[in-house]
Image (cartoon, grey):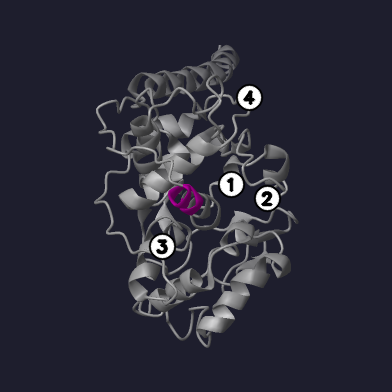
Amino acid sequence: MASKRLKRALIGIPLVLVAAIGGVVAYANLTYKHDFASTPKPDIKASTDPKVIEHGAYVTHAIAHCSACHGNASFVEKHTLGPDRNDLRGGYTMHAGPFGTFYAANLTPDPETGLGKLTDAELARVIRHGVSPEGRLDAMMAFAVGPMSDEDLTAIVSYLRSLPPVRNPVPSDEWGLVAKVLSGKFHPRIETIPKYAPPGDTPTVERGAYLANGPAVCSVCHTPRDPLKGFVPLGPLFSGGAMAEPDSTDPEYEIIAPNLTSDPATGVLVGFTEESFVDRVRKVGQTTKGSPMPWDNFKQMTDSDLKSIFLYLKTLPPAKNVVGPARRKKGWKPDKT
C-alpha cells in the first residue's frame, strides 16, 4: 500500500508542476498590461528644410545611435555600421532570455514594412514615449531611448521621412513570460521634455548634461538599475552598471559599464582631460574587445559635443562604487582583502 501511495505521489509531482507553470502562464497572459493608447502624441511635424534633415541625421547616427540597432541586420550582428548610413531597414534580433525576443523595426518610409503609414505624431510618440501606433508598449524604445527636446525629435522625424524606402518585413516583438509577469512595472516614458541645449563650437556643461541624460542615454547603461522593477536606479546616476553583459567576442569574458563619476578610487575618468577623453572615444572601439557600447556611432560626434559630455561628467558628485574592470573574466568578484 505504501509503495502504491509513493508511486502515485511521484507521478503527481510532474502534474502539479505542469499545473503550476500553466497557471503562471495563464495569469501572465491575462494580466499582461500592454494597452497605452491614451498616451499623448507629441505635436511634431516633419520638416523638409535640408539643415533640419542633416541635423536629424547627426542625432540619429552619432548621438542617439539608432543605426546601432536599426541598421542592416547583417552589419548590426557584427557590431559594425554598414557603408550606407541611410540603410535603416532593421531586422536585428535581440534575444533577452525569459524577457522575450525583440526586433529592431524598419525605419525607412516603406508603406508596408516600414514607417510609411505612420503619422508624424505616431512616429514621435514611439520615439518619445515608447508607445507603438497601436497603443502598445514598445519595450526597447521605452528603455533604450533617452528624453530629447522637440527640436531634436523634429529633426529625427524629418530625417527618417527623407530616407529611401526599403521593403524589409520585421516580426513583431515577442514578450516572454518574465516580461509579461512584470509588465505592471513597465510603463511608457512620460518625462518632462528637456530644455534644448543647441550644439555649438564651444563646449558647455549644459550641452553635455542634455546629451548624457537625454538622446545619448549615457545615464541608462552607466547607472545601476533593477530590471525587475522597471529599470529604476539602484544607486547614484553614472556610478556604473549593476550587471555585466556577455563579451560578444569571447564567452569567457564579460563587460560592465564603468563608474563615470569623479570618485578618485572607483571613477574611470580621473586624470582625463577634454582632449584625452575625445581621443579615448575615437579609439576605444578599436582597442576594447566585446564592448556593447556603440563606439562607431559615438566617435561620429563632434569634438565640441564630446567635450561637453566630459565637462558635465566632471561636475558629478563622487560616488564610490566598485564595479571592477570594464572587461574581465566571466564571474569576476572583487578582492575582499
Q: What is the CA distance from the residue labelled 3 to the residue labelled 1?
A: 17 Å
The residue beneath circle 4 is 167
Disc 2 is placed on an element classified as loop
The number of numbered badges drawn on the structure is 4
Q: Are marks 3 and 1 in contact (CB under 8 Å)?
A: no
Q: Neighbour class for label 4 at 10 Å: few (<14), some, many (≥20)?
A: some
Amino acid found under the numbered disc labelled 1: Ser
Is 102 placed left or right of 191 in the picture?
right
The residue beneath circle 1 is 67
The residue beneath circle 3 is 211
Q: Neighbour class for label 2 at 10 Å: few (<14), some, many (≥20)?
A: many
Q: Main secondary structure of the magenta part?
A: helix
Q: Quadrant of the N terminus?
A: top right
Residue 51 lies in the magenta stretch: yes
Q: What is the CA distance from the residue labelled 2 to the residue labelled 4?
A: 19 Å
Query: Is residue 230 something that shows in the picture?
Result: yes
Q: Earlier in the sequence, mark 1 or mark 2?
A: 1
Judge by depth and name the residue closer to the eye, 145 or 307.
Answer: 307
Residue 226: give x, y in percent of width and height. Answer: 40, 52
For residue 81, the mark is 2
Disc 3 is placed on an element classified as helix
Residue 43: give x, y in percent of width and height. Answer: 27, 37
Judge by depth and name the residue closer to the eye, 218 or 266.
Answer: 218
Q: Which-is-in-front pick, marks 3 and 4?
A: 4
User: Quadrant location of residue 298?
Assistant: bottom right
Residue 207 lies in the magenta stretch: no
Amino acid found under the numbered disc labelled 4: Arg
Write the residue at 48% across / 29% down. 177
Depicted 135 relative to depicted 11: above or below: below
